[in-house]
Amino acid sequence: MGIKETAFYEGGPHIGDLILNILLGFTVICLPLTVGAVVRALWLRYRITDRRISVMGGWQGRDRTDIIYAEVVKIVKVSRGIGLWGDIVVTLRDKSRLEMRALPRYREIYDYIAQKAADKTGLSLEAIKS
């Protein structure tokens, strides 16, 4: 039996991302953005726990990426949709990046991930949030 994890956030992208991109889809130029938002809404799921970050996505949600907080060296957030949702980019020790798009409660999630990473790596909170 494994160690129990406590979920901080489980869910998909913010519904506002889908609504905004559908409205933009009425202009033919923004149609690729609309398709991307629909695919995210259908198959992208995030699970952020006290032990790891899991992102399930890809075609029909078949791809899964898990990272542990000990690998995180930097985290950056970007507001979207007038601050109602946002993107978070997590940089790992091996310089790879994990992008999480259209997260609701992204400010809380950003602070949570930064605190967990600081606790696990020994880096300061300021260094991780740089």
Image: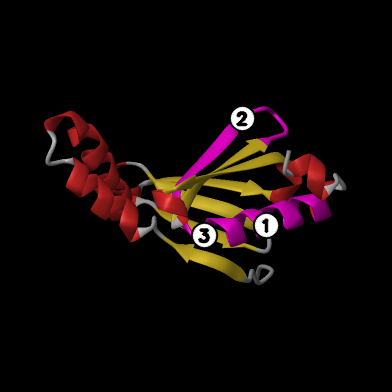
Residue 47, disc: 3
- Vertical order, 19 against 31 (above or below): below
Contact between marks 3 and 2 (CB within 8 A): the answer is no
State yes or no: residue 41 in magenta: no
Identify the residue position indicated by label 2 in the image: 96
Above-or-below relation of 81 to 91: below
For disc 2, the neighbor class at 10 Å (few under 14, some 14 to 19, many from 20) is: few
Looking at the image, residue 11 sits to the left or right of residue 77; the answer is left
Mark 2, mark 1: which one is toward the viewer? Answer: 1
User: Label 2 is placed on what type of residue?
Assistant: Ser
Task: Name which residue type carries label 3.
Answer: Arg
- For residue 13, the mark is none
The residue at 69%/69% (across/down) is 3
The amino acid beneath tag 1 is: Asp
Image quarter (top left, top right, bottom left or bottom right) of the N terminus: bottom right
Name above or below for residue 95 compared with residue 27. Answer: above
